[in-house]
Image (spheres, rainbow, N blue to C red):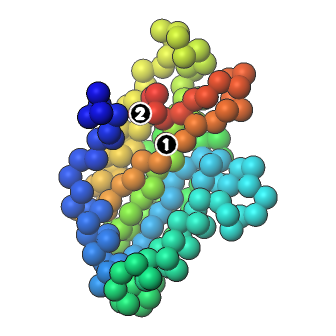
Amino acid sequence: EIEISQPRTGPAIRLQRFAQKLLEGDDVEVVIIGGSVSCNAGVEDESVGYPKMFEKLLIEFLPSMALDAIALSKVHVTNACVAATGSEFFKHCFALHTTKNTDLVILETSINDHFYSGCRDLNSDECDDGINGDIEDLVRNVLGISRWTAVIALNSFCPLHDGGRLNGGDIYH
Protein backbone atom coordinates (compact mmCIF):
# COMPACT_ATOMS: atom_id res chain seq x y z
CA GLU A 1 0.00 0.00 0.00
CA ILE A 2 2.93 2.35 0.49
CA GLU A 3 3.61 2.32 -3.25
CA ILE A 4 0.03 3.39 -3.98
CA SER A 5 0.38 6.43 -1.72
CA GLN A 6 3.34 7.83 -3.65
CA PRO A 7 2.63 10.35 -6.39
CA ARG A 8 3.24 9.61 -10.03
CA THR A 9 6.24 11.68 -10.97
CA GLY A 10 6.98 10.55 -14.50
CA PRO A 11 10.39 11.18 -16.02
CA ALA A 12 12.11 13.93 -14.06
CA ILE A 13 14.47 15.08 -16.81
CA ARG A 14 12.69 18.42 -17.27
CA LEU A 15 12.87 19.20 -13.54
CA GLN A 16 16.48 18.04 -13.49
CA ARG A 17 17.26 20.51 -16.27
CA PHE A 18 15.55 23.30 -14.32
CA ALA A 19 17.65 22.48 -11.24
CA GLN A 20 20.79 22.25 -13.38
CA LYS A 21 20.18 25.74 -14.79
CA LEU A 22 19.95 27.07 -11.23
CA LEU A 23 23.12 25.28 -10.22
CA GLU A 24 25.00 26.67 -13.22
CA GLY A 25 23.82 30.23 -12.58
CA ASP A 26 21.62 30.46 -15.67
CA ASP A 27 18.50 32.61 -15.68
CA VAL A 28 15.24 30.76 -15.08
CA GLU A 29 11.66 31.62 -15.95
CA VAL A 30 8.82 30.28 -13.80
CA VAL A 31 5.11 30.78 -14.56
CA ILE A 32 2.41 30.12 -11.98
CA ILE A 33 -1.01 29.32 -13.46
CA GLY A 34 -3.83 28.98 -10.99
CA GLY A 35 -6.86 30.25 -9.19
CA SER A 36 -7.41 32.04 -5.91
CA VAL A 37 -4.78 30.03 -4.04
CA SER A 38 -2.17 31.38 -6.45
CA CYS A 39 -3.73 34.85 -6.09
CA ASN A 40 -3.16 34.63 -2.31
CA ALA A 41 -6.85 34.60 -1.39
CA GLY A 42 -7.19 34.97 2.35
CA VAL A 43 -3.55 35.97 2.80
CA GLU A 44 -3.20 39.42 4.32
CA ASP A 45 0.46 39.83 3.41
CA GLU A 46 1.30 38.83 -0.18
CA SER A 47 4.90 38.15 0.82
CA VAL A 48 3.81 35.03 2.72
CA GLY A 49 1.64 33.60 -0.08
CA TYR A 50 3.06 30.58 -1.85
CA PRO A 51 4.06 32.37 -5.11
CA LYS A 52 6.32 34.84 -3.27
CA MET A 53 7.58 32.17 -0.88
CA PHE A 54 8.54 29.94 -3.82
CA GLU A 55 10.35 32.83 -5.51
CA LYS A 56 12.12 33.66 -2.24
CA LEU A 57 13.15 30.01 -1.88
CA LEU A 58 14.75 30.04 -5.33
CA ILE A 59 16.48 33.38 -4.84
CA GLU A 60 17.62 33.23 -1.20
CA PHE A 61 17.57 29.71 0.18
CA LEU A 62 19.08 27.64 -2.61
CA PRO A 63 22.44 29.48 -2.76
CA SER A 64 23.18 28.38 0.78
CA MET A 65 22.36 24.79 -0.14
CA ALA A 66 24.31 24.43 -3.37
CA LEU A 67 26.87 26.14 -5.56
CA ASP A 68 27.64 29.86 -5.36
CA ALA A 69 26.56 30.16 -8.99
CA ILE A 70 22.89 30.14 -7.97
CA ALA A 71 23.34 33.62 -6.56
CA LEU A 72 24.12 34.73 -10.11
CA SER A 73 20.90 33.27 -11.51
CA LYS A 74 18.10 35.66 -12.28
CA VAL A 75 14.80 34.12 -11.27
CA HIS A 76 11.80 35.57 -13.08
CA VAL A 77 8.43 34.48 -11.68
CA THR A 78 5.21 35.39 -13.48
CA ASN A 79 2.06 34.87 -11.46
CA ALA A 80 -0.70 34.42 -14.04
CA CYS A 81 -3.42 33.69 -11.51
CA VAL A 82 -7.10 34.37 -12.10
CA ALA A 83 -9.29 33.77 -9.07
CA ALA A 84 -12.15 31.29 -9.41
CA THR A 85 -10.69 29.89 -12.62
CA GLY A 86 -9.68 26.36 -13.54
CA SER A 87 -8.12 24.30 -16.30
CA GLU A 88 -10.94 24.90 -18.77
CA PHE A 89 -9.94 28.58 -19.00
CA PHE A 90 -6.18 28.21 -18.76
CA LYS A 91 -5.92 25.53 -21.45
CA HIS A 92 -6.89 28.25 -23.94
CA CYS A 93 -4.81 31.19 -22.67
CA PHE A 94 -1.66 29.71 -21.09
CA ALA A 95 0.38 30.92 -24.08
CA LEU A 96 -0.27 34.55 -23.10
CA HIS A 97 1.94 34.03 -20.03
CA THR A 98 4.58 31.60 -21.28
CA THR A 99 7.37 31.68 -23.85
CA LYS A 100 9.60 29.06 -25.41
CA ASN A 101 12.07 30.00 -22.67
CA THR A 102 9.73 29.10 -19.80
CA ASP A 103 11.56 26.60 -17.62
CA LEU A 104 8.89 25.67 -15.10
CA VAL A 105 5.10 25.98 -14.96
CA ILE A 106 3.27 25.42 -11.69
CA LEU A 107 -0.39 24.47 -12.19
CA GLU A 108 -2.80 25.08 -9.31
CA THR A 109 -6.32 24.48 -10.57
CA SER A 110 -7.61 21.62 -8.42
CA ILE A 111 -10.15 23.47 -6.29
CA ASN A 112 -11.71 25.33 -9.20
CA ASP A 113 -11.67 22.27 -11.42
CA HIS A 114 -13.80 20.58 -8.80
CA PHE A 115 -15.99 23.53 -7.91
CA TYR A 116 -16.92 24.40 -11.50
CA SER A 117 -17.21 20.84 -12.76
CA GLY A 118 -20.78 20.46 -11.56
CA CYS A 119 -19.61 17.85 -9.07
CA ARG A 120 -20.95 19.13 -5.78
CA ASP A 121 -21.48 15.82 -4.01
CA LEU A 122 -18.44 13.62 -3.58
CA ASN A 123 -20.65 10.53 -3.53
CA SER A 124 -22.66 11.48 -6.62
CA ASP A 125 -22.40 9.99 -10.09
CA GLU A 126 -23.38 13.35 -11.60
CA CYS A 127 -19.84 14.72 -11.90
CA ASP A 128 -18.84 16.30 -15.20
CA ASP A 129 -16.39 13.98 -16.96
CA GLY A 130 -14.90 16.99 -18.76
CA ILE A 131 -12.89 17.98 -15.70
CA ASN A 132 -10.20 15.39 -16.36
CA GLY A 133 -10.03 16.32 -20.05
CA ASP A 134 -9.45 19.99 -19.23
CA ILE A 135 -6.48 19.40 -16.92
CA GLU A 136 -5.09 16.84 -19.35
CA ASP A 137 -5.36 19.33 -22.22
CA LEU A 138 -3.69 22.02 -20.11
CA VAL A 139 -0.79 19.78 -19.10
CA ARG A 140 -0.25 18.58 -22.68
CA ASN A 141 -0.37 22.16 -23.98
CA VAL A 142 2.14 23.36 -21.39
CA LEU A 143 4.48 20.42 -22.06
CA GLY A 144 4.38 21.46 -25.73
CA ILE A 145 5.85 24.92 -25.01
CA SER A 146 9.31 23.46 -25.44
CA ARG A 147 10.92 20.10 -24.97
CA TRP A 148 12.41 21.35 -21.68
CA THR A 149 9.48 23.07 -19.95
CA ALA A 150 8.84 21.29 -16.65
CA VAL A 151 5.42 21.08 -14.99
CA ILE A 152 4.49 20.78 -11.33
CA ALA A 153 0.84 20.18 -10.46
CA LEU A 154 0.14 21.81 -7.11
CA ASN A 155 -2.95 20.31 -5.55
CA SER A 156 -4.64 21.98 -2.63
CA PHE A 157 -7.85 21.59 -0.77
CA CYS A 158 -10.32 24.13 0.49
CA PRO A 159 -12.36 23.62 3.65
CA LEU A 160 -14.64 26.56 2.77
CA HIS A 161 -16.50 25.27 -0.30
CA ASP A 162 -19.28 22.71 -0.41
CA GLY A 163 -20.60 23.26 3.08
CA GLY A 164 -17.23 22.89 4.72
CA ARG A 165 -16.21 19.58 3.14
CA LEU A 166 -12.64 19.28 1.98
CA ASN A 167 -12.13 19.09 -1.75
CA GLY A 168 -9.32 19.34 -4.22
CA GLY A 169 -7.23 17.79 -6.92
CA ASP A 170 -6.22 14.84 -4.82
CA ILE A 171 -9.68 13.51 -5.62
CA TYR A 172 -10.11 14.75 -9.19
CA HIS A 173 -6.68 14.93 -10.87
Residue 38: image location, x then y, percent: 60, 53
- The quadrant in which residue 134 appears is top left
> Residue at 58% across / 66% down in the picture?
53
Furthest residue in direction right, as rendered: 44
Observer-nearest of 78 and 166: 166
On screen, residue 53 versus residue 138, left or right, reads right
Observer-nearest of 102 and 9: 9
Residue 43: image location, x then y, percent: 74, 55
> Residue at 32% across / 70% down in the picture?
18
Would residue 76 be seen by someone viewing this image from the given angle?
Answer: no
Q: Quadrant of the N terminus?
A: top left
Which amino acid type is marked by label 1? Asn
Find disc 2 in the rendering and name its residue.
Answer: 173
> Residue at 32% across / 39% down in the picture?
6
- The quadrant in which residue 172 appears is top left
Find disc 1 in the rendering and name its residue.
Answer: 155
- The quadrant in which residue 45 appears is bottom right
Instruction: Determine the secondary structure under disc 1.
Output: loop
Which amino acid type is marked by label 2? His
Residue 104, placed above or below residue 9: below
Residue 122: image location, x then y, percent: 54, 16
Q: Quadrant of the C terminus?
A: top left
Residue 20, placed above or below residue 24: above
